[in-house]
Image (spheres, rainbow, N blue to C red):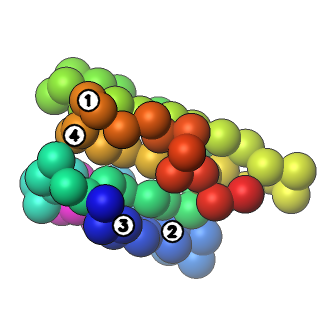
Amino acid sequence: MRKILIDARAMAHPEPLEKGISALRELGTESYLYMLNHKNPIPLINLAKQHGFQTLSHEDTQNLWHIIISKSKESTLQELLDV
């Protein structure tokens, strides 16, 4: 699967949400969004779930959030986690 990476750590609000929504529009079943952020982007996650995407949010030991969003129902998001 092809990873679409968004590093939102240095972005100001609302840029992470805007970039995330743009990436969701491009996702097919062979790609996934991987976002790094200092907080869990609940609005983006809720929007993705409303449109049938799988989501995974994981906070690592350095308080960095790893967010994975995929359209594929066949992939295990935990396997895509880079921590």
Quick one: label 2 or label 4, which is nearer the N terminus?
2
Quick one: label 3 or label 1, which is nearer the N terminus?
3
Residue 45 rendering spot, x and y as whole percentages: 39, 35
Q: Which residue is mark 2?
A: 8
**46 left or right of 10 in image:** left
Asked whether disc 2 touches disc 3, contact meaning CB atoms under 8 Å apart, the reply is no
Q: Quadrant of residue 37?
A: bottom right
Q: Quadrant of the C terminus?
A: bottom right
Residue 24 rendering spot, x and y as whole percentages: 20, 52
Q: Secondary structure at mark 1?
A: loop
Q: Which residue is mark 4?
A: 71
Please identify the dominant SS of the magenta region.
Answer: helix
Asked whether disc 3 touches disc 1, contact meaning CB atoms under 8 Å apart, the reply is no
**2 vs 1, front mark:** 1
Q: Give the extent of the magenta segment.
A: 19-23
Check disc 1: other Cα within 10 Å, few if <14, some if 14-19, many if 20+.
few
- Residue 15 seen from this side: no
Residue 67 rendering spot, x and y as whole percentages: 51, 48
Residue 38 rendering spot, x and y as whole percentages: 66, 57
Q: Which residue is mark 3?
A: 3
Q: Quadrant of residue 9?
A: bottom right
